[in-house]
Amino acid sequence: MVDNQHIRFQRDLGDGLLLFLVERTGGPLQIRAADGSLRMPDRVWAVEAFAEGRLRQVPTLENLTSARRQAQQREYAPDQVAELDPRAALRRFVLEGLDRMGIHVLGDRALHLALCALWAAEPDKAAQFGKPNPRTVRRWLKERGTPGERTSRQMLSMSGRVARSRRLPPITLWLLQKAVLKYWSTPLSIADVYAWLASWIERINRWRTQSPHTWPPLDRPSIETLRQDIRRLECYETYAAKFGEKLAKKRFKANGKGLTAARFLQLGCMDHTLLDQIAVIDGEYMLPVGRPWLTVIIDVRTRCVVAFVLSYEPPSLFQALECIKRANQPKLHLHSRAPKFPVLSSIFGRFDEVVVDNGWEFSGKSFEDGMADVGTSVRWAPVASPTYKAIVERFFGTLNEILNKKAPGGVLKPELLREMGYDPTKDAVLTIAEIEDLIWEAITYYHIEEHSGIKRPPADLWRQDMEAYGIDVIGDDHQLDRMAGAMKFPCTLSRSGLEMFGLTFHEQYATGELLEDLISLQPIRGQRKGSATAQVKVKYNPANLGEVHVWNQRRNFYVTLPCTDETYSAGISLWHHQQLKAWAKQKGLEFSTQEDRLAARLKLVEMIQQSAPELRLRQRRAVARLLTAPKILKALKGNSATLAYAPSRHDGMAPVIPHDTLARHRIDGDTPPNRPPRASKPKGRQRPEQAKPRQHPTPKHSPADALTQKPWKGFKL
């Protein structure tokens, strides 16, 4: 073979020229000379092609049996051959010894004398084996290579390693093939298909017994034979035909390289999961409110969990942005939890890029705009490809092994809980604070244990990169709160402030300065007579409507406007506010003044507290969001604190690099991203109503038609 082309050496033509025939065409092989012309190959070319690995000898397989031909085509290492077949060493010893003696195919007496001489010449080796029969040795000489080319794979016995010829009748093999195809093309199970096969064999046997020919009945193959034939045909095409393309790709398509990063905080991976605990937040009734959602962001390089958010709210923009904000803050409380590992409190910082899925909370413009202000780019994973974020998915599995199966609120079968004397809806009494504490314990253990992917503890690798690069952070947490929030654009700012969600946000001096800075940038058309207005971009925290942040396009920073109704809006979430408005509208209450809003809020809470014990489990998740204030409140008026960082010290504190946010330098800060929306799951098209077909009277069959019907003959599958 030369250059993957099968050729056959014919003869030496003299003067160094060689004749090779191309098996595909039957013509002579010609090679291209340096000047581009074609010429016959010579000995110099053959030596050079052999040295380069382009020309190699392929053993001939025409005279070999099917088993020996398959053995020649397979690749077995010598140690693997010795492990699979201990008698392979005997065959090599006998054949190589006979080749040295120059003995090839002889009679039984001559082979017997040659074997005796071989056993006498090398008694140490011969003592390990028994002397084979001369007829067996003659077969070895014919089938297991040629003198000088006795390879290890030809010494291996292929008994049980090749497909045997089927001993079933052709019609049974044909029915088996039909049954296999029926399994892969329908939702039927193996037992269902075997019942179908058995019924047809029984029908054929019944037909054979009634036939004038003396045909023997067919033996029914076992269900194991059918199962092996089904598994033998399993491949991507058959699996996709039975279970769908998505599961077939998940089963057969090879995974890619995966996410990689050259240093810590270069690439983060964020995702949500639903925990397996039933938590309780109401101390009076101990009502289970459902399974909480966990949002996690993990550093791809070190596998460290930089931040997490636990909430009963379904995945939302607030949880995603809150996770980014928590990742920017040191974990100082871990000093007391694990004093031997001070590096755990230094697992924080700003990511250069974050990988997320295509959920609405990630694909919306608010998340992308907030990340652009922070200086973090967003990478969306391919649609319906959970393996793309295998790092965070694997952590969820690890967390489930460490924590969820051992926690008292772990999910067990209801019948098992009742046998143990527990009520599944009452006795899982973990609060959300207790679950957070358990998660921190599990993450601490996860950080100091050796990770199978990086072959070292994640905290140790974080410490190494922290000392080499320092930690890039956003130094002003207040600025981060303003940038990382839900966005609303456009909103109208007037002398009375900003009106959103039925609430007014206004502060006299801040509103006046905003109007003076922005009025010259606004178009003349649309302005109110005698009153300045401006179209602005606003960011707000969905969990706290106490204030909003308005973008000053001229000065490139956010200005905070508090809600004028401080008593009502302090700590109230957007979801809670909307529920109060809807409830007040349903009850016919006014919802305009501060007193009316407070009265509506009090009546709703009292009604929920009276009716809570009778609510079903799936309704209690909404009850918890009403009865408890939002857990994460970062910028409440009068309770704000400035985050400061100490310089590097001998005890392991990392150098902190303050990061100047891009919000002040963006020239497009007043406009949201204008990219097309991310692809989502297509909605099913509704077919237009079609006119019903006209119904024709069904003709009645005459008795004559019934007499002309012939009985059914033959079989159809």
Image (cartoon, helix red, strand yellow):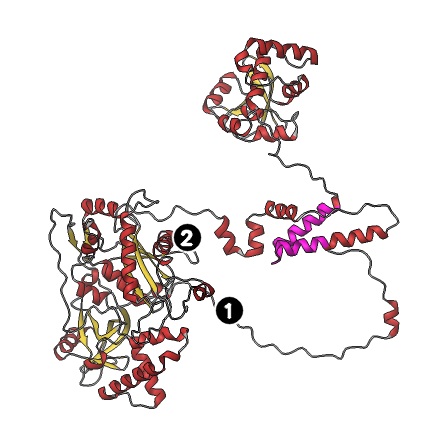
Report the residue at 12% width, 49% height from top.
648
Tell me if residue 259 comes above or below residue 595 in the rendering.
Answer: above
Name the side, left or right, on which 606 lies relative to 704: left
Q: Is residue 149 visible?
A: no
Observer-nearest residue: 424 or 308?
A: 424
Magenta-tinted stretch: 171-198
> Does the stretch in magenta take in 213?
no
Measured from the top left, where is residue 628 in percent x and y? 28, 74
Secondary-structure class at tag 2? helix
Q: Which mark is residue 14?
A: none
Tell me if residue 24 comes above or below residue 125 in the rendering.
Answer: below
**Residue of label 1:** 684
Measured from the top left, where is residue 534 in percent x and y? 22, 77
Image quadrant in which the C terminus is located: bottom right
The amino acid type of the residue labelled 2 equals: Thr
Q: Nearer the viewer, mark 1 or mark 2?
A: 2
The amino acid type of the residue labelled 1 equals: Gly
Q: Which mark is residue 387?
A: 2
Report the residue at 35% width, 44% height from top.
452
Name the side, left or right, on which 612 lies relative to 241: left
Observer-nearest residue: 54 or 141?
A: 141
Q: Residues within 10 Å of mark 1 (few under 14, many from 20)?
A: few
Measured from the top left, where is residue 210 in percent x and y? 85, 53
Image quadrant in which the N terminus is located: top right
Quarter occupied by residue 678: bottom left
Please name the predominant secondary structure of the magenta segment in the image. helix
